[in-house]
Image: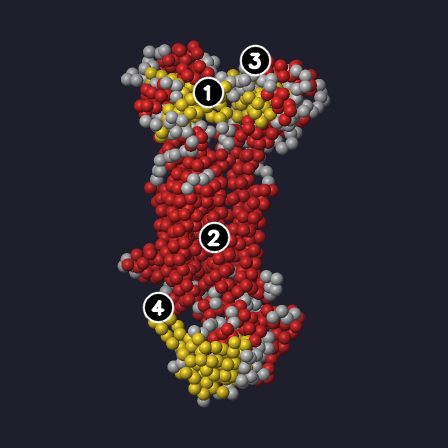
Amino acid sequence: MGSFSPLLLRAGLRYLLRHRWQALLALTGIALGVAVVLAVELANSGARAAFRLSAQQLQGKATHRLVVPGASLPDEVYVRLQGEAGGPPMAPVASDWVRVAGHQGRYRLVGFDLFAEAPFRSQLAGLSDAGGFVRDWLTQPDALVLGQATARALAVSEGDTLDIVYQGRPVTLRVLRVEAQPGSAGQDLLLVDIATAKSILGLTGRLSHVDLILDAGSEQWVRQRIPHDVQLLTVAEQAQGVTRLSAAFELNLTAMSLLALLVGMFLIFNAMTFSMVQRRTLFGRLRAIGVTPRELFGLIMLEAVLVAVPGTALGMLLGVWLGQGLTRLVAATVSELYYNVSVTALHLQWPALITAAVLGLLATLLATLLPALQAARTPALTTLSRAALEQSARRAIPVWAAVGLAMLLAGLLLALALPGGVILSFAGLFMLVVGAALMTPLVIRVLHRLLERCALSGLWRMGVRDLDRHLSRLGVAVAALMVALSASIGVGVMVDSMRAGVNSWLSDLLSADLYVAADAFAEGATLPAPVVEAVSGLPAVAAFSRYRERTLPLAGRQVEVIGAQLAPASRQGFTLTGGGPSSVWQDFDAGALLVSEPLAYHLGLQPGARLELPAAGRAVGFTVAGVFRDYASEHGRIFMDEAVYRQFWPDQPVHTLALFAGDGDAGDMRRAVSELAGRFAIVITPARAILDESMAVFERTFRITDVLRVLSLIVAFIGVLSALMALQLERGKEYAVLRALGLTRGQIAGLIGVESLLMGLLAASVAIPTGLLMAWVLIESVQRRAFGWTMPFSVDGGLLLQTLLTGLLAAGLAAIYPAWRSAQRDPAPQLRED
Amino acid sequence: MVRVDKLAKVYCSGATRQVVFEALSFAVERGEVVALVGASGSGKTTLLNLISGIDSPDSGSVSLDGVEVTALAEPERTLLRRRRVGFVFQFFNLIPTLTVGENVALPLELLGEGDTAAQQRAADLLQEVGLAGLSPRYPETLSGGEQQRAAIARALAHRPALLLADEPTGNLDEDSGGRIIELLTGLARRQHTTMLLVTHSVHVAAAADRVLHLRHGCLAAS
């Protein structure tokens, strides 16, 4: 491109200016594609960063942590270590999640020892003593320090009181100081003195953990001095399980944003192909007067850069704006489901911005490469002939279809048959989509032939023929719309399948008539033994199940271990995907484990396998009795018989009771339990209410997916609009001839409308099978490899109909302006034109 | 200057085989103006495309000043066209996104000529073809005759050795056509440019030094 002619470049630029609608639509396509990817990345990384920041503020310079898996740490471990000379820096911490009265989400109450903090968290140790802060901190049992952002979110200032709730118990704290924390996006820290925290959290004589700063030598020093049930973990190991909390959520968002980019790429490809096709005569003229293919290729690629740069820049601006909206949605969902995240957590992160910029530019250049090569390589004579172009496009159709079929099959193979991780699943998914897009023109031809056999009349017949006649221009637009619609179906069917799976799983699992838990069960409150005895001893209760839970670290995951005494009806609620029912329950009663599907998948566990759990300070081997379908935790859950469980954790109280009325009246049982509720702080929930609430959470989780589906459809809509606009520009003379022959303005508009609707119909027809294949890959490969979940393939006919109508609606709407414009144009000048 | 030797071109479309010419031979001397006359579909345009290297023959050869065009690879044929050949088409084929002046300057710019020199040459040529004041206008604002004059100026801008004119008056009325042919042949002769002029008009052909009739794939002189 070194010897590039400025006149050629000027000609290209003026083409863009003259066809500003088309240039604008290409620009919009790039901008939207980039915007969606950037917005999702910003929202995701905002939530991630907020959590990381919160964890970092808490972790400070600590390298290691002393913990007792699934329990608290006795004070004496810290006291003994600290008492010995030559030990490393260490700081005790007491912390747990609490709720703040009148506010949503969870907050982390952290109690620390001001005097031990200096090496760890300088911002805490360095709290200024102005106004007697240290004295007040140590002497006032309700003293609280907050970050500015947290104080703002909770609408409190220094001197105000704050009501928190821990395991149902209300505690009032007084804000002693509001600190200007740097990077206060992690809006979930409530800082108190360690004695206050221990008192609130009921950790008398115990700690949550001890933070340490260790090097290789001091690590050995600590290991030699800790009891066998205490574990020394690196902070990274400890944090790993927690940061995986929202992985499923993030993966779905990322998948949608990449699909939007793919649709955006098709749009650019569509716009650039049109631009090439429209200018075939111009290229022919240039080639005839001696412009080389290389110069032509350079000119086209340069034009692409000229569109890509402002398109990407615009997309980035739009992405930041859209990112703010998405961050609110993500923050609301993450706060609701996982941990409290500030809605102001959007941070413009350079990696995300650079990725979006590179994606926008590369996607445009990649999408332009093929049309540019085609335009440059076409001999001058062929370039001058429009019929030859359509002929060559038709000749290429079987080749593209064969390549497409090969890609589609290879994609399926990669995603479903070959071993690999979730990245390969996505690679397979994209190959499938691109393969289907390449096959689209062939399907158009086949459907065109079928439609031609129908006895169509008038405009419909012309529309059908035109569709085939302009295949080189319309094929790509139909493919772009098809990709957007199929992505919508794929993700829609996946969400529907998940919904159906979760619903059926919950319906099976929640087989009891009533569930009883402590009033503050959400904060981890348990049922006192007298309550359990009183409730389960009620005459109206025919059978009951008891559940005791704790979280254990296992292979980098935070696995829930549940000790359960299961009534026969509860056992029927388990859908076993591994192991025969009769032998599974026999083995379970004999001390073997039931392992949830995600855990079994990630650890490669089958019935009969051995699994070691950290129990009672040592690794205890268990046999896996069976594997059950479970969506409660992507980390995994393990059920073991209550009797076995209590051998290792005898003090663990009951969390939940499931009550069965048997043949008796569930109403009687409810009344009886309600009477007890007056005496004890318990909550009684019918299975239906739990199911409804769980499904409501599910719907809230996937609300953002719907937003992204709509965005993809907007991108596709612009694709169809640009295709129709370009075609209308090109066929101006043809319409003028039709007008001269006597077609009314309405009939011209009708012809464009018919063509557009046929495009929508054809796109939807290909999108439905493609979308179903995508859903299959998403369910069987992406979800399985990422989370170990299996789910029934559930297709809602309404969704398919909705897609068909969306395709028609998008195409119909896209036709309005071109149809109006074509109908309004005066045919005389066009008839005179060269 | 131009030597065509046993040139053959056949178009195949499915099972249909259309022989345009099988062993066409002729020569055009330097500075000669030759009219190529023939009925529609006789292969006149195909012959011009083969001589200019836009199209390739099935057999035979074409030489320009001793350079065998048919032996060159496509990029070399393009560069030869850029340096040695000028084109005038029936439908003008001006670049719609360049002004008249820029259209005329384009071949010079492609040859790497300086901006000022190219503009000066374009201005001189536009003066010569009678479009002196129309340089900043875009092609679609000109009449057919004016567009063809601009196309002639563009074709001659880089002083080509060979000028190929394909039905240059086919899209014009008789008067305009006559003036265009006068201008075209006059300029070609003044620049000593060899010209091959495709036409089916006897009047247009009369302006040439020699007329060749293309009939059923064979040439006959008159």
The relative height of residue A778 versus residue A600 in the rendered view (above or below) is below
Give the number of the mark in front: 3 or 1.
1
**Residue at the spot 39% in from the left edge and 34% down from the top edge:** A790
Task: Using the numbered discs, state the Cα–Cα distance from disc 3 to disc 4 in whole angstroms.
Answer: 93 Å
Residue displayed at 57% across by 53% down:
A309
Residue receiving disc 4: B14
Q: Nearer the viewer, mark 3 or mark 4?
A: 4
Q: Secondary structure at mark 4?
A: loop
Q: Disc 2 designates what residue?
A: A267
Look at the image and tell me whether residue A728 can be seen.
Answer: yes
Q: Are marks 3 and 4 in contact (CB under 8 Å)?
A: no
The three-letter code of the residue at mark 4 reads: Gly
State left or right for residue A43 relative to residue A126. Answer: left
Precedes in sequence: disc 3 or disc 1: 3
Query: Which of the marked residues, 3 or 2, is nearer the chain's N terminus?
Result: 3
Residues at marks 1 and 4, CA–CA distance in whole angstroms? 78 Å
- Mark in front: 3 vs 2: 3
Q: Which residue is mark 3?
A: A204
Q: Are discs 1 and 4 located on one and the same chain?
A: no
Residue plotted at (52% across, 81% down): B2
At x 48% / y 67%, what residue is drawn? Answer: A379
Near-viewer residue (A657 or A180): A657
Q: Amino acid at mark 3?
A: Thr
Query: Residue A441 falls in which quadrant of the image?
Result: bottom left
Mark closer to the chain start, 1 or 2: 2
